[in-house]
Amino acid sequence: SSELTQDPAVSVALGQTVRITCQGDSLRNYYASWYQQKPGQAPVLVIYGKNNRPSGIPDRFSGSSSGNTASLTITGAQAEDEADYYCNSRDTSGNYYVFGTGTKVTVL
Amino acid sequence: QVQLQESGPGLVKPSQTLSLTCTVSGGSISSGSYYWSWIRQPAGKGLEWIGRIYTSGSTNYNPSLKSRVTISIDTSKNQFSLKLSSVTAADTAVYYCARDRYDSGVYYPGSFDPWGQGTLVTVSS
């Protein structure tokens, strides 16, 4: 079973802000990374480290962390942001990696 | 720009060994201090990290798969490989290879970028 828990689905109106959360004990000690996955495609890294975006990722994507919860925020969601989002980090032992359960984001 | 490409049989019989290769292009697999990972995703389900290999050959595996997994590296071919033994239908998935993110002199283990496009492996008789 996954050690990182995400809400299964969230929806957001076009242009509004949505926060996706990822909960797990390991997040007290390790940063989460965030991935966007569209149907039939490989995941794409959108946030890594404290709050870093790879080149080409819009600045409407941002990451934060508090306690055992990491968050991905999309400020001003666009239609193309509709996708599945996964967090990942180390497990509580720090010896391997786990992915979150995934969140489906729908842009209305 | 480094690119990864998975290859291998798309159909494997139950109880047999799944074998996949990830070919790295646009850079040397042995340059830098990267970990190279395998990740899988059953249809309609989430992502599962399988394991990783360092350029030196040291490995780490997901405990849930450790008894069945072997990851190896061939620097002469710029490839790393996955072997998963005693497969069942539960191992049917899209298998991805990926590398740790590297940015401005800093490695980010466990932040996977880039990824290969993925390859579907079906376990069926």
Image (cartoon, helix red, strand yellow):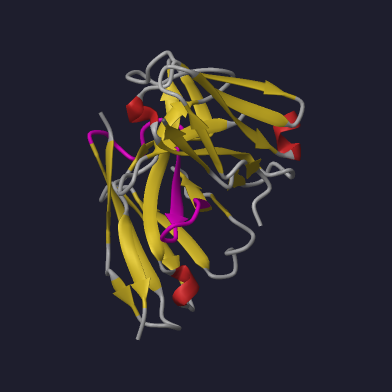
Task: Please give the count of numbered marks on the rendered protein.
Answer: 0
Find residue A42 and report its image quarter.
top left
Q: Nearer the viewer, residue A95 or A54?
A: A54
Residue B95 in which image quadrant: bottom left
Q: Nearer the viewer, residue B93 or A95?
A: B93
In which quadrant is the C terminus of chain B drawn? bottom left
Residue A7 relative to residue A41: left or right: right
x, y percent for residue A17: 51, 19
Q: Residue at x 35, y 18 (%)?
A: A55
User: Percent position (x, y) of residue A12?
Assistant: 49, 27
Please indicate whether residue B21 sits to the left or right of residue B32 in the image.
left
* Residue at image point 45% right, 76% down: B89
| Magenta segment | B26-48
Q: Is residue B42 magenta?
A: yes
Which residue: 48% across, 63% down? B70
Q: Is residue A102 left or right of residue A23?
A: left
Q: Quadrant of the N terminus of chain B?
A: top left
The residue at the far bottom in this view is B125
**Looking at the picture, does residue B57 appear above or below residue A82?**
below
Q: Main secondary structure of the magenta part?
A: loop
Examine the image and state in which quarter residue A54 appears.
top left
Relative to A5, A40 lies left or right: left
Most extreme residue toward the left is B26
Q: Is residue A71 magenta?
A: no
Residue A66 visible within the image: yes
User: Residue A43's spot in the image, x, y percent?
Assistant: 39, 40
Is A14 placed above or below A23 here? above
Instruction: Say if residue B112 shows up in the picture.
Output: no
Instruction: Give whichever of B21, B96 is nearer the camera.
Output: B96
Instruction: Please determine whether, in this image, residue B53 is positioned above or below residue A46.
Output: below
Where is residue B66? Give x, y as percent. Answer: 59, 63
